[in-house]
């Protein structure tokens, strides 16, 4: 279960990331049991060494917490870790990036702000494909025999638009060339 993490050693504010699989406005199912969570993937350029190093340090801090608080005093031989290489994923959007998948429980809605730190209320403003900074935190878990470090999303600051990653088109594009005359509607 993700909780707001008060341990500063496990918190990270990223450098510029690209938002993908965005579910920051409303919780969505994240697994087969239908558990609803706020969630997003944050794509990180591999040359953003500052962010990657901060994540590595925060993950190590979360591992230390796990050893003392949920893994019986020792580090498990296998751990699920939150930082992934996008080249290992079949989704072309991830190629050439590192990424983390971050979640938050429905009780902990992430904040969403603009570059002036003012709340964004228009859901069309923040979407899969835009860019910004993510406030994330890392925590140890031991659930159903799975042990590892998870990533929680605290908030997102949008700083610029990007090409949307969703396969949606506008109504104008979808119905381009269709002209309906009033007489057609009466038949």
Image: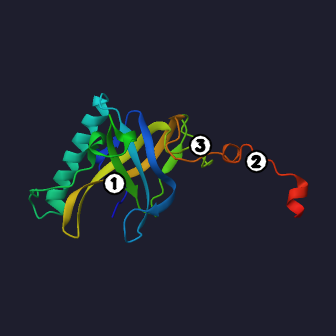
The answer to which of marks 3 and 1 sits earlier in the sequence is: 1
Left or right side of 166 for 97:
left
The answer to whether marks 2 and 3 mark residues whose Cβ atoms lie closer than 8 Å is no
Left or right side of 142 for 124:
right
The answer to whether marks 1 and 2 mark residues whose Cβ atoms lie closer than 8 Å is no
Pointer 1 residue: 5
Callout in the foreground (3, 1): 3
The quadrant in which residue 51 appears is: top left
Asked whether 2 or 46 is in front, the reply is: 46
Pointer 3 residue: 125
- Numbered circle sitting on residue 65: none
User: Looking at the image, which residue is at 8% across and 58% down?
Assistant: 74
- Position in image of residue 122 (x %, y %): 63, 47
- Position in image of residue 67 (x %, y %): 14, 57
The quadrant in which residue 68 appears is: bottom left
Left or right side of 177 for 115:
left
> Around disc 3, counting alpha carbons within 10 Å, would you say few (fewer than 14), some (14 to 19), or many (20 or more)?
few
User: Looking at the image, which residue is at 11% across and 58% down?
Assistant: 76
Pointer 2 residue: 178
Callout in the foreground (1, 2): 2
Identify the element where label 2 is drawn.
loop
Question: Quadrant where the C terminus lies?
Answer: bottom right
User: Looking at the image, which residue is at 37% across and 69% down?
Assistant: 32
Q: How many marks?
A: 3
Question: Quadrant where the N terminus lies?
Answer: bottom left
Left or right side of 35 for 68:
left
The answer to whether marks 3 and 1 mark residues whose Cβ atoms lie closer than 8 Å is no
The answer to which of marks 1 and 2 sits earlier in the sequence is: 1
Mark 1–mark 2 Cα distance, whole angstroms, equals 53 Å
Identify the element where label 3 is drawn.
loop
Callout in the foreground (2, 3): 2
């Amino acid at each position: 279960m993700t909780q707001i993490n008060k341990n500063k050693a496990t918190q990270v504010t990223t450098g510029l990331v690209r938002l993908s699989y965005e579910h920051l406005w409303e919780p969505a199912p994240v697994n087969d049991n239908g558990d609803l969570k706020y969630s997003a993937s944050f794509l990180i350029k591999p040359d953003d060494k500052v962010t990657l190093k901060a994540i590595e340090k925060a993950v190590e801090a979360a591992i230390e917490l796990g050893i003392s608080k949920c893994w019986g005093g020792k580090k498990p031989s296998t751990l699920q870790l939150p930082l992934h290489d996008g080249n290992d994923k079949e989704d072309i959007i991830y190629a050439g990036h590192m990424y983390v998948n971050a979640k938050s429980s429905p009780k902990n809605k992430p904040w969403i702000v603009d570059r002036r730190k003012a709340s964004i209320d228009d859901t069309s403003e923040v979407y899969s494909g835009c860019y910004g900074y993510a406030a994330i935190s890392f925590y140890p878990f031991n659930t159903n025999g799975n042990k590892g470090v998870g990533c929680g999303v605290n908030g997102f600051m949008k700083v610029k638009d990007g090409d949307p990653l969703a396969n949606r088109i506008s109504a104008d594009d979808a119905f381009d060339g269709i002209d309906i005359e009033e007489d057609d509607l009466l038949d």
